[in-house]
Amino acid sequence: MTDEIVNPNEHLIIPDWINEKYFEKVLAQDEPDHVKVLKFTPVAAIPPGENFTSTMLRIYIKLEMKDGTIKTKTYIFKTMLPDERGGNDINQFGLFPKEAKMYETYLPAYEKLYKDAGWDIQLAPKCLHTEERNGDIHFIFEDLSVKQFKNVDRTKGLDMDHMTRALHKLAEYHAASAVYEEQNGPYPKEFLEGFVTRDVKKFHVDGFNLKEKSFKKAMLTWGMQDAENYVKAFPTTEQYWAQCLSTLDVDPSEFNVLNHGDFWSSNLMSSYFPDGSLDKLILIDFQITMWGSPAKDLLFFIILSAATDLRLKEFENFVRIYWDRLVECLKVLKFKKPLPQLRDLQSSMYKKTHSFYAFFSLLNHLPIILFPTDKDSNLHNLNAETEEGESLRLRMLSNPAFGSVMKDLYPFLYNRGILNYEDYDV
């Protein structure tokens, strides 16, 4: 490892309590043979625009070991956003307590289910430390980049190989979550809510009202035939909130899993063989996990992550790729209930209780994902009721890369009834 330290976001302010003293416990457990810390350097872990709900740091620690050698260790430190940078909005969702449960209890239990069945499957990075401090929750993770894991370029989308492996990994995670529930009973009630919680109506409705004007304006620039009809059929605020609430209705007769809830290309990391082919893939960021149909994760993931030339062409095939692996995993984990059928999974992609994940991905995530990294693209600016905020939103929604995707994607979803908002009229 070289001494060269790269900081992908010079604008990030790092709290001064994140220091070597804070890492004493983790180092004692993880590097018992070190005698002292020679150098402690915290930097941003990711460029601006890659993560909107937390602060991610990479910590470089230079250690002197008992045998006199020098060793450099790196860790990933994840903490909440400061209130004034959008943290207040995020904290209403209770994301961090949920993620702490995922890393402390559920993910290790899922991996153990596979181990007991004779399969060696890693779903997530190792979490070395979680704690609550002054109302904030912090995590320290192994640094997957040391094992050559990296994120893919979110603006390009995933090729067939990455999509297949990601869908397989999602299926492994979902299968274990369903078997765990079968063996241990229902998850705590906070896992019945994801992006939508009943008491964050203001956040959703304000966000929708803020984006509605620029979204409709941009729709006319994407080159869709009869664009005016799509603008006319755009939801009212009431219809949008009714759609939000409908995602909380879980049908117990459906096959249900603990959805990742925010599954797109930046929430997975991959490692590669020397020839460049894909070796391993791992999931990260379990803040918005929610019990319900896997259609929610599938809609979100396919819409946000597939490369443009694959998204629509392989849409149904992606569902099948996922289902094949899901059934294989459920069998090996001895799932006792009836196995989900492909026809049921395909039709659940169109159920009105899951369509929120399709629309929200278009309104909220996709414009950001297809927008090149920009120091101003953060949650705070994006939701600002200012001229700068409005101009950033319009720039994102009229971005030619976004428009060329939406020109085909919007009609594709619309023609399947997924964007039929009168379905939500009471």
Image (cartoon, helix red, strand yellow):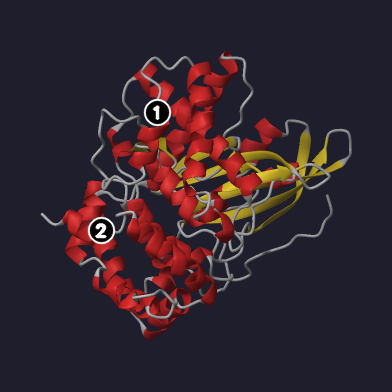
Kindly tell me whether residue 202 is visible in this rendering: yes
Can residue 261 be seen by looking at this rendering? no
User: In the rendered view, does 120 fall on the left or right side of 238?
Assistant: right
Label disc, if present, on residue 91 of the rendered structure? none
Q: Amino acid at mark 1?
A: Gln
Q: Residue at x 63, y 59 (%)?
A: 153
**Residue pointed to by mark 1:** 341
Secondary-structure class at tag 2: loop
Closer to the camera, 89 or 329? Answer: 329
How many labels were placed on the picture?
A: 2
Provide residue 356's location: percent of width, then percent of height.
Answer: 31, 53
Residue appearing at x 73%, y 30% in the figure: 32
Q: Nearer the viewer, residue 376 or 11?
A: 376
Q: Which amino acid, by three-letter code, is at mark 2?
A: Asn
Point out the tag, 2 or 1, that comes first from the N-terminus.
1
Q: Residue at the right extreme?
A: 68
How far apart marks 2 and 1 lie (CA) works out to 26 Å
* Above or below, 294 relative to 177: below
Q: Secondary structure at mark 1?
A: loop
Q: Are dots 2 and 1 in contact, CB under 8 Å?
A: no
Report the residue that reaches farthest toward the bottom: 387
Vertical arrangement, residue 287 with respect to residue 50, above or below: above
Name the spot of residue 269 as percent of width and height, x first: 63, 46
Question: Is residue 70 left or right of 130 when viewed as pictured?
Answer: right
Mark 2: few, some, or many residues within 10 Å (few <14, many ≥20)? Answer: some
Local crowd size for mark 1, using a 10 Å CA cut-off: few (<14), some (14–19), many (≥20): few
Left or right position of 359 against 128: left
Residue 420's disc is 2
The reply, left or right, for residue 213 in relation to residue 408 is: left
Q: Residue furthest left?
A: 426
